[in-house]
Image (spheres, grey):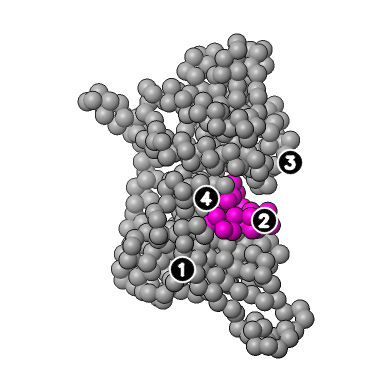
Amino acid sequence: MTTEQRTTAEQQQTGVGTGLPAQAGNPRWTTEVHRTDDALDTVAAEWDDLAARCATATPFQAAAWIRSWWRHYGRPGALVVVLVRRDGRLAGAAAFQRRGRFGGGLTNLGGGLVDFTDILLDDSCADRAAAELAGALPLRRPWHSLDLREVHPEAAAQRLFQHWRGRRHRFTDSLCQYLPAVPMEELLKRLPGKTAQRSRVKQRKIAESGVEVRTATPAEVPAAIEELLRLHFLQWQERGVTTEHRTERFAAHLTESTTGLVAGGRAAVHRYWLDGEPVAVNLLLLCPSFGGLYMYGAHPALRERLDIAGLLFGVALDEVRGAGIPLLSLLRGQEPYKQRWRPDQLPNQRLVLGPGRLAPAAAFRACRVRARQAVVQVLRTRLPRLKEALVARTRSRS
């Protein structure tokens, strides 16, 4: 069966579906589980309407992003969409992918391309919608589980975690970093004296350089993303480019999703021109709680003339401040150019839900996850140059 529907006991008690009039003031709650590959397409308009009523929603939960990801990365037959309706209006929504054909495990969409995973809940009835969604999750067998990566500590998915009545686990996931959306001069006050002084000199150099910044329209996004990826490859060619970023499917997904996000006001693509030539492109994600620096490309020659981070951060700060957004998120990763600005740090979380009590096998998996996370933390904090050394070693052998 591709679609399952359920009506809560409250609906039955009020007489809905029995021919009796419903009592005034008692909402009718229903849930649906869709398993067809076009499930996201059929609810796209409702999905974005709900996202506008969900304070925690990020661009990664927008229909433009998840539909594009599913088209280019999803495994046919593996999509599971859970919907909660209050008097027919969408009040909760979540999209998952089955991890295996027969295992019964679910995970979030987006894979390693998303910095924040979440579900959607109507702010006006978030707790009840979360409880209904928890009751509708298709996790019935002892070996079933829902594994959500990169969940913000204040995400709507945390409510789902609270209402889940089976076994549940919370682990630390990737570290995200944030800066207050304040004028550049105020941001420089976070830096040590000499560093701040050097940064002011760099900012004056940027202001005097003649760099022109243009914001791409939705029609211009495809060309801008193609430009971004070309410059991204150039800037990282000596240090190793993420393999996935070189694939056709990533380019197609980034182009399609960004076009939709820009059209909906959930992203901005800034193109930088100098001496009549395009020298950098930056993709900035936008939502009420933060503006996120997702990906950029800059010509290597520009790095020799200007401070790239200072250039991008300055324009991004102006964008998010103009939109009344309180934070500039540097998203995941602890690259040196981010650390220089002394950002505030807040780790994401990994939420794992399953039916029943904790079985020995599940306990072993939980211990294994914690051990793996401890190793990753050691590598990140005590051996920061390990990745660079391994890349250099691999290049020397090739």
Residue 49 tag number:
2
Amino acid beneath label 1: Thr
Are the two marked residues, 3 and 1, in contact with CB atoms closer than 8 angstroms? Answer: no
Task: Of the two numbered discs 4 and 1 on the same chain, state the one appearing first in sequence.
Answer: 1
The residue tagged with tag 1: helix, strand or loop? loop
The secondary structure that dominates the magenta segment is helix
Looking at the picture, tell me which residue is in the foreground, 121 or 215.
Answer: 215
Task: Of the two numbered discs 1 and 2 on the same chain, state the one appearing first in sequence.
Answer: 1
The residue tagged with tag 4: helix, strand or loop? helix
Who's the residue at 47% across and 53% down the image? Answer: 109
Who's the residue at 65% across and 28% down the image? Answer: 215
Q: Quadrant of residue 238?
A: top left
Determine whether 210 is above or below 74 in the image.
above
Amino acid beneath label 2: Asp
Direction right: furthest residue? 24
Who's the residue at 47% across and 33% down the image? Answer: 335
The residue tagged with tag 2: helix, strand or loop? helix
Q: CA distance from mark 4 to mark 3?
A: 28 Å
Task: Of the two numbered discs 3 and 2 on the same chain, state the one appearing first in sequence.
Answer: 2
Task: Quickly name the residue at label 3.
Answer: 324
- Residue 7 visible? The answer is yes
Who's the residue at 56% across and 18% down the image? Answer: 278
Task: Quickly name the residue at label 4.
Answer: 67
Task: Of the two numbered discs 4 and 3 on the same chain, state the one appearing first in sequence.
Answer: 4
**Circle 2 crowding by C-alpha within 10 Å: few under 14, some 14–19, many from 20:** some
Amino acid beneath label 4: Arg
Task: Quickly name the residue at label 1.
Answer: 2
The region drawn magenta spans: 40-63
Q: CA distance from mark 3 to mark 2?
A: 21 Å
Q: Is residue 289 left or right of residue 117?
A: right
Q: Is residue 168 left or right of residue 385?
A: right
